[in-house]
């Protein structure tokens, strides 16, 4: 059975043969009642405070759990972003490499065309030189022949 300060204050004792000093017992009971009431009130307040603190702890534990979950999610997101960025970078490098190879091939084809054109122009130049030389030699021969004819005539 739980005792209250009121129970202590209202407690009466029967008197025996030798009896007791009523004033002392009543004064003692009053002191005990006041002390018990103070302890009872403090206990009640501490229980209420404990309930509040337990609720607060529960709240902070929920916040902690939420923060941990958020941190895990942020780490996972960061990893995914990092992997995606690495994948995109690898793709960009591959595309750049393919583009470079394409441009090198294209440049080599253009270079081959230019070399062929240069060779063709060199052949034309050589042919024109030969034709010009032949023309000049023929012209010289014709001049010499005409000089001889002029000398004879």
Image (tube, grey):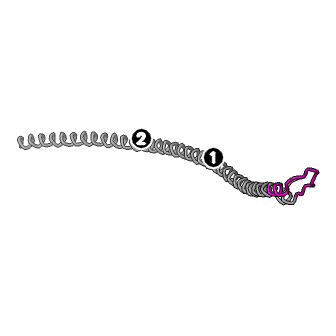
Residue 76 - label: 1
97 horizontally vs 74: left or right: left
Q: CA distance from mark 2 to mark 1?
A: 47 Å
Q: Quadrant of the C terminus?
A: top left
Query: Cβ–Cβ below 8 Å for labels 2 and 1?
Result: no
Q: Which residue is mark 2?
A: 108
For image coordinates 88% across by 57% down, the residue present is 11
Give the secondary structure at mark 2.
helix
Residue interval drawn in magenta? 11-27
Q: Secondary structure at mark 1?
A: helix
- Residue 137, by quadrant, is top left
* Residue occupying the point 30% across, 40% down: 122
Horizontal side of 10 relative to 40 (left or right) equals: right
Front residue of 65 and 82: 65
Instruction: Please say whether residue 3 is visible from this viewpoint.
Output: yes
Residue 3 position within the rendered picture, expressed as x and y whole percent measured from the top left? 85, 54
Q: Residue 37: horizontal and vertical position, in percent?
A: 78, 57
Q: Residue 45: horizontal and vertical position, in percent? A: 74, 57
Q: Can residue 83 be found in the magenta stretch?
A: no
- Picture layout, residue 8 above or below residue 106: below
Q: Nearer the viewer, residue 6 or 48?
A: 6
Of the two numbered discs 2 and 1 on the same chain, state the one appearing first in sequence: 1
């Amino acid at each position: 059975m739980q005792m209250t300060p009121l129970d202590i204050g209202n407690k009466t004792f029967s008197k025996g043969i030798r009896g007791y000093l009523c004033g002392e017992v009543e004064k003692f009971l009053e002191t005990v009642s006041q002390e018990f009431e103070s302890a009872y009130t403090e206990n009640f307040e501490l229980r209420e405070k404990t309930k509040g603190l337990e609720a607060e702890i529960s709240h902070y534990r929920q916040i902690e759990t939420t923060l941990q979950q958020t941190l895990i999610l942020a780490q996972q997101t960061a990893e995914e972003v990092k992997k995606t960025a690495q994948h995109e970078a690898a793709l960009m490098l591959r595309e750049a490499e393919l583009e470079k190879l394409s441009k090198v091939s294209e440049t080599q084809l253009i270079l081959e065309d230019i070399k062929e054109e240069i060779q063709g122009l060199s052949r034309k130049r050589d042919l024109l030189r030969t034709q010009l030389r032949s023309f000049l030699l023929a012209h010289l021969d014709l001049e010499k022949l005409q000089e001889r004819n002029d000398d004879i005539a």
